Image: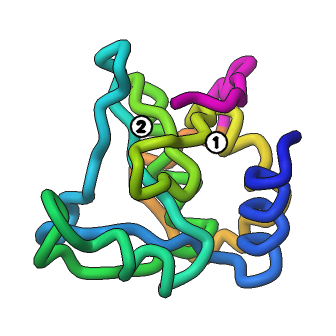
Amino acid sequence: MENKLELFISTILETRKVWLLEAKEGFFAMLEGADGEPYIPLWETEEQAAKAAQGDWEGYTVTDMGFSELLHWLKELAADRINIAVSPEADGEITAVASRQFAEWLKPYDDHSFKDEDSDDDFDYGEGWAEPWS
């Protein structure tokens, strides 16, 4: 794992949350890669997310999400083929992680505090990938 991804994972494991930019309730900032693939950017700190709330994301609200809720959301993202952009840089460089792989990393830390009526405990996370992308 590259240093950026290692730092991201270790930080969120310590804080047990990630940071996002929210346009309005339930609508989050997204990126499109050069290949046309969609990504949801996640940051490990509130400060990093706040710094990113400019340009196209000006006026977005910085919000956090705990692991339990995030795990449920990652199921939807994986089904919609939307992956994760780890702490995107101002120049557009990201480290991409498959939603399914990210969910597998977080699964052992789920505290089950977020319950979804349609919870599918048998969800197949499959084999994900993680690779630097710019």
47 vs 115: above or below: below
Q: Residue at x 56, y 36 (%)?
A: 99
Q: CA distance from mark 1 to mark 2?
A: 16 Å
Q: Which mark is residue 41?
A: none
Q: Which residue is mark 2?
A: 77
Can you tell which quarter of the image residue 52 is in? bottom left
> What span is in magenta?
122-134
Q: Quick one: label 2, few (<14), some, or many (20+) residues within 10 Å? A: some
Q: Quick one: label 1, few (<14), some, or many (20+) residues within 10 Å? A: few
Q: Which residue is mark 1?
A: 121
Q: Amino acid at mark 1?
A: Asp
Can you tell which quarter of the image residue 132 is in? top right
Q: Residue at x 14, y 72 (%)?
A: 58
What secondary structure is marked by label 2? helix
Q: Position of residue 70 (x, y in %)?
A: 53, 60
91 vs 44: above or below: above
Could you tell whether 25 is left or right of 3 in the image?
A: left
Could you tell whether 113 is left or right of 27 in the image?
A: right
**Badge nearest the viewer, 1 or 2:** 2
Q: Residue at x 73, y 65 (%)?
A: 110
